[in-house]
Amino acid sequence: MKSALGLVALIAVLSFCNLTDKSKQGNNSNAGDTKPAAPQNESPKTDPQQARAELTVELMKLEYIVTTASYAGDISTLATYVADDYSGTTADGVTQNKNELLASTKPDKVTKSWKITDGQLVSSDADSAVLNYTQHQTLKDGRTFSARITDTFVKRDGRWLVKSEQATLVR
């Protein structure tokens, strides 16, 4: 729940920034400006920082969906967001392909709560992206854990999929 609120807050902040940028653009036009409007078929140039922030939000949303599905044991949803050529390494050193990941996915009965924070887009291009984030987990017995996770995404058929994951326990 806390991660959902954090994600909503992040989206709200980014949306606010986006609206602020648009209002600044609108206020910079002068009545005497004779610069022709861009043709309708041309896409406006995207601010690289804005595009990077939007991609970070999009990938963090996917992380939330994938993590929720994983904890719920929802193999169907998880399979939708994981690439067929997936390769992952868990915090305890276990490596898995997609079939092994799905086969090992069961409803989590020991976790009280979890959240993902500190999302940082490391690199991206049109068809791939690397995202780092921290996942915090609190067990029902009160113990807590954090892992630093690096996920590589690929864009296939217009959708982002998790292609690889590396989780490292934070001590």
Image (cartoon, rainbow, N blue to C red):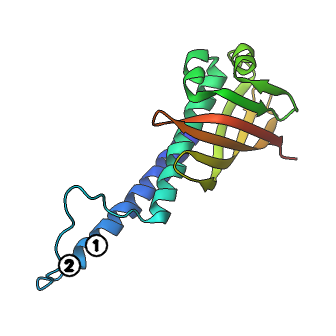
Quadrant occupied by the N terminus: top right
User: On the image, numbered disc 2 is attached to which residue?
Assistant: 29
| Distance of label 1 from label 2 (alpha carbons) | 7 Å
Question: Is mark 1 in CB contact (under 8 Å) with mark 2?
Answer: yes
| SS of the residue under disc 2 | loop
Residue 150 sits above or below residue 54 on the image:
above
Q: Which mark is residue 25?
A: 1
Q: Which mark is residue 80?
A: none
Q: Residue at x 62, y 28 (%)?
A: 83
Q: Residue at x 55, y 43 (%)?
A: 59
Q: Residue at x 66, y 35 (%)?
A: 163
Quarter assignment of residue 154? top right
Q: Is residue 2 visible?
A: no
In this view of the protein, which residue sits in the foreground, 21 or 170? 21
Residue found at the very far bottom of the displayed protein? 32
Q: Residue at x 11, y 82 (%)?
A: 31
Amino acid under disc 2:
Ser
Q: Position of residue 74 (x, y in %)?
A: 60, 17
| SS of the residue under disc 1 | helix
Left or right placement of residue 26 versus residue 169 in this view:
left
Residue found at the very far left of the displayed protein? 31
Q: Position of residue 53 (x, y in %)?
A: 50, 57
Crowding near the residue tagged with mark 1, few <14, some 14–19, many ≥20 C-alpha atoms within 10 Å: few
Q: Position of residue 102 (x, y in %)?
A: 69, 17
Residue 131 sits above or below residue 45 on the image:
above
Amino acid under disc 1:
Gln
Left or right placement of residue 137 versus residue 19 in this view:
right
Q: Position of residue 138 (x, y in %)?
A: 74, 34
In this view of the protein, which residue sits in the foreground, 129 or 136? 129
Q: Is residue 23 visible?
A: yes
Residue 78 sits above or below residue 168 on the image:
above
